[in-house]
Structures are given as C-alpha cells and as structure tokens.
Image: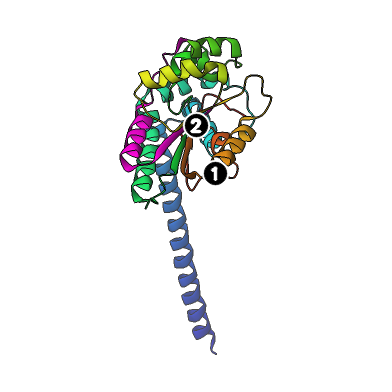
Amino acid sequence: MDPIHSLHTHLLYSSLLIKKLATMATARLLLLLTVSTFCFCSGAIIGIGDELAVEDQRADAAPSCGSLRTAVEARNIVGWKTVPPHCADYVESYMTGERYQRDSDIVINQAIAYAESLKLSSSGKEIWIFDVDETALSTLPYQANHGYGTQLFDNTSFQQYVAQGNAPALQGTLRLYRRLLELGIKPVFLTDRTEDQRAVTTNNLLQQGYYNWEKLVLQPVGLQISTLAFKKCERQKLVNAGYIIVGNIGDQWNDIRGSPDGARTFKFPNPMYYVD
C-alpha cells in the first residue's frame, strides 16, 4: 500500500471513530439530562429532602396498623393481648366507619349466597352455628369505653356490660339469620358466655330480633377450657345428635376451627381482641 493511500485510510477511520465517540457522548448527555429532569419532576410532586421523609412517616402510620389488622384476620398473628396504642385511632375509625360495614357485608353476602345454593334434606336437621359476641351481638359500646382493644381485657367490667342486656345486633348477621329461617335452616347460638347468663342473653337476642332458634349453647359456670376446645366439643355433640352443620360463623378463628366445623365457615372481621 502506497503512503498516500495508507494516510487516507487512517484519516477515514479516525473520522468515523470521532463521530462514534461524539454520538455516544451525546446519548450519555441526553440520558443524564432525562434522569435529572425526572428526579426534579418527581421532587416537585412528592417533595424532596425532609419533606419526603415527613411524607413517608405520614404514609407509614396508618398502613402499619392496617397491615397488622390484615395479619390478624389472616391468622398470621395469634395469641396477642392488646392492640398497639398507636393503632387506637385506626381501630376506632375502622370499627365505626364504612370499612367495617363493607367488610362485614361481604362476609354476609357470601354466606347468604352459599346458603341459597344448598339442597336441603327432608330431615330438617340442617343447622347454622352463630357465635354471639361480635357476631350476633355487638360489644362495640363497651369497646369504645375501653380503648378499642388497647387495654387489657377486664372480665369484671365486661360481664357488667353483658348483664345490662342491651348489646345491639349486628345488622348483617340479622339479615343472614332471617334468610336462613326462610330457607329452613335452623340457627344454633354457640357462645362462651356462661349458663348464669342464659336469661340475659336470651332476652338480649329476642330484643334485637333473633326471635327463634334451635339451641342456645352456653358454657357451664367455672369450666376451665379454651374457646376452641369448648366449641369443638359442643359441635361434636350436635353432630352426634343427628344435626348437619351446614354453616358456621364467628368473629374469632377459634369460634370456627376444629372438626367438626361445618360444611362452610365464615369469619367476621374483628381487630379489637383475640380469644384463645
């Protein structure tokens, strides 16, 4: 190759290399400008520096309590004694607002749809088991005066509330109860209230519109047994007597766990307390 041709080739390669490097530099500059613009715009929307930290703190307060409630309902947290103090306002807002009503309505609507799909036998032995407190009747007036679950459970004051006999009905449960009667499914109330509270519980249920049931099963006074063990045992007695448990609803997992639990179980929301 002659010197002139070699020089020409070298200059051509150099020119192409310079153009390529210039193109890469331009692209990199555009990328940096794009990222900077995005960060600036993002900062303008949600705040930067201290404001972002404040925004995050505000956002985290409610979701942390909401996440706890979800974990409780999913039974990922068990054995807890009280609601964290910083969640008192959240629980109050949930229980007294539309969210609790909507969540409860979903449970009831599913229960009614299931009941309506059943083909009942001619025996008339199909029953539906209801828990009482926080399922058929509400203790929210009591809970409102005791921190919505942030205070340790005080059995004496709670029994005084029960003895008043004026706990309001949960309207969704009452709607399910009435539909079951129309379908020919017999209600059974199974509660860890004790036998010495039978009269006040009966009157309270009647007063709130629960006017007919197959059985009202209460704990013997002084019985030292968990809710889970007691209710499991009583359901077995019902099955042994020939009853068919087509449905079972309660606000505690221990209301509805343990065989025989019924053909379908339904869990009412309750972020205020946990019962063993």
Give the quarter of the figure containing the C terminus: top right
Please report the residue visible at 54 percent of the width from the left and 38 percent of the height from the top: 256
Q: CA distance from mark 1 to mark 2?
A: 22 Å
Between 40 and 28, the residue placed more toward the observer is: 40
Please report the residue visible at 40 percent of the width from the left and 34 percent of the height from the top: 103
Between 257 and 89, the residue placed more toward the observer is: 257
The extreme right residue here reads: 224
Between 214 and 44, the residue placed more toward the observer is: 214
Q: Is residue 214 above or below residue 272?
A: below
The reply to whether discs 1 and 2 touch (Cβ–Cβ < 8 Å) is no
* Residue 70 pos. (x, y %): 51, 36
The amino acid type, in three-letter code, at marker 2 is: Asp
Q: Magenta stretch: give its range.
A: 164-191
Q: Is residue 269 visible?
A: no
The amino acid type, in three-letter code, at marker 1 is: Val
Q: Is residue 121 above or below residue 231?
A: below
Q: Which residue is mark 2?
A: 251
* Residue 243 pos. (x, y %): 49, 43
Residue 185 in magenta?
yes
Q: Which residue is mark 1?
A: 239
Give the quarter of the figure containing the N terminus: bottom right
* Residue 66 pos. (x, y %): 49, 31
- Between marks 1 and 2 in the image, the one whose residue lies nearer the viewer: 1
Q: Is residue 160 above or below residue 171?
A: above
Does label 1 or label 2 sit earlier along the sequence? 1
Between 243 and 255, the residue placed more toward the observer is: 243
* Residue 200 pos. (x, y %): 47, 15
Residue 215 in magenta?
no
Q: Is residue 250 visible?
A: yes
